[in-house]
Image (cartoon, helix red, strand yellow):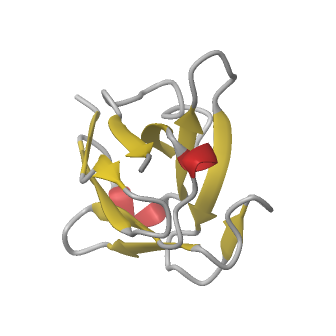
Amino acid sequence: QVQLVESGGGLVQPGGSLRLSCAASGFTFRIYTMSWYRQAPGKERELVASITNTGGTLNYADSVKGRFTISRDNAKNTVYLQMNSLKPEDTAVYYCNCMSARLSKYWGQGTQVTVSS
């Protein structure tokens, strides 16, 4: 079955960094575009970044451009999100997702990121 397991979240001070990981299984990871979403309390889930199957095209939300970097390791079936210069407004639960009509319904448990002094 499809599984997405996010990890790497935590509490960090403003200006700090975190690296999130998402381990995927149950599908052919290397052929799909993958993405990171986040959901803050009381807000809708929003797309943060995406990466095509070979890593050739990266897209970012305007709010994270220049601070976040998405990457992937197809040998490890893992997608990453390097987050630098974190701000309190980055506080949210972060999820990875497969950008496929068939697989996009699957979500992991997410990983909590809290940016606070």
Residue found at the far bottom of this picture: 56
Which image quadrant for residue 60?
bottom right
Number of callouts = 0
**Can residue 99 be spotted in the picture?**
no
Residue occupying the point 41% across, 69% down: 16
Q: Is residue 69 left or right of residue 93?
A: right
> Which of the image's four quarters has the N terminus?
top left
Give whichever of 30, 56 is nearer the camera.
56
Residue 80 image point, x, y percent: 37, 65
In the displayed structure image, the side of residue 71 where residue 56 appears, left or right = right
Name the foreground residue: 4 vs 102: 4
Horizontal relation, residue 1 to residue 44: left or right: left
- Residue drawn at x 51%, y 41% is 91
Residue most extreme to the top = 42
Q: Quadrant of residue 110?
A: top left
The image quarter containing residue 45 is top right
**Vertical relation: 68 (above or below) 46:** below
Name the residue furthest front.
117
Residue 32 at x, y percent in the picture: 50, 58
Q: Is residue 92 shown to the viewer in this render?
A: yes
Q: Position of residue 3 (x, y in %)?
A: 25, 35
Is 40 situated left or right of 13 in this image? right
Question: Residue at the location (21% across, 75% down)?
Answer: 75
Residue at 68 percent across and 22 percent down: it is 43
Q: Is residue 28 above or below residue 56?
A: above
